[in-house]
Amino acid sequence: MTFLANCSNPLVCRDLDLLRALAAYGGVRVHMTVTVLDQELWRLLEPMTPNPLGRLAAVAELSAAGIPTSVFLAPVVPLVGEDDALEVLKAAAEVGVDAVMVQPLRLSAGVREWLLPRLDHRLPGVGREIANLYQGRETLAPQARRRLMAPIQARRDKLGLGRPVPPLCERHDQLALFGVAYDASEPNHPPA
């Protein structure tokens, strides 16, 4: 049994004893979402979410307890969060994560209508500039994506955080609790 926690809430540390026990079997990994560190930008992009500094503190606590951790740096907002993304990478390395996954902003319906006017109100013209980078699509135009991601990926790789997230250990001896033997020849179909 494996357990993967994707979260953006430092309350995951409430279960530190359970996570530590699962980590002893190689069956747990915690991915923590950290979008930005800048406090003003955090309030603009992620109102009513846990403080990213608290999220990083939680990652540090989990990592120190021997629990495999990684950061999901997302969404990276072009023109607004690019510089801060580099700071998130540095902070992630300092707290002991072993990987960082990066994803640019997906400008889907709803997000577009909420975020772009909000950005324009605080940073006049930025919402319109961001919309131009997307060219009416949900994802960044290829050239804009390369420009956004190149320095972030270079920093991530320099910090050693660009490797794939290590897989969780698959343990099947728990099935014995239910009187079931695991057939390794059929990894996707445990016996009934």
Image (cartoon, rainbow, N blue to C red):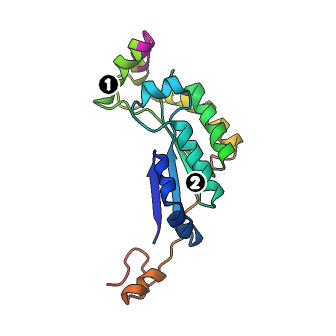
Q: Main secondary structure of the magenta part?
A: helix
The answer to whether residue 58 of the structure is visible from this angle is yes
Q: Which residue is mark 1?
A: 114
* Residue drawn where x is 54% and y is 41% of the image: 54
Amino acid type of the residue that numbered disc 2 sits on in the rendered structure: Thr
* Residue drawn where x is 51% and y is 72% of the image: 170
Where is 24 relative to 162, above or below?
below
* Residue drawn where x is 32% and y is 24% of the image: 114
Rendering coords of residue 187 (x, y %):
44, 76
Q: Is residue 127 magenta?
A: yes
Is the residue under label 1 in contact with that under label 2 (CB below 8 Å)?
A: no
Rendering coords of residue 72 (x, y %):
51, 44
| Residue lying at the far front of the rendered structure | 14
Q: How many marks?
A: 2
* Residue drawn where x is 59% and y is 55% of the image: 62
Rendering coords of residue 150 (x, y %):
60, 32
Disc number placed over residue 69 in the picture, else none: 2
Disc number placed over residue 97 in the picture, else none: none
Question: For the N terminus, which image quadrant?
Answer: bottom left
Residues at marks 2 and 1, CA–CA distance in whole angstroms: 31 Å
Q: Secondary structure at mark 2?
A: strand
Q: Secondary structure at mark 1?
A: helix
| Residue lying at the far right of the rendered structure | 158
Please report the bounds of the magenta region as a residue range. 122-130
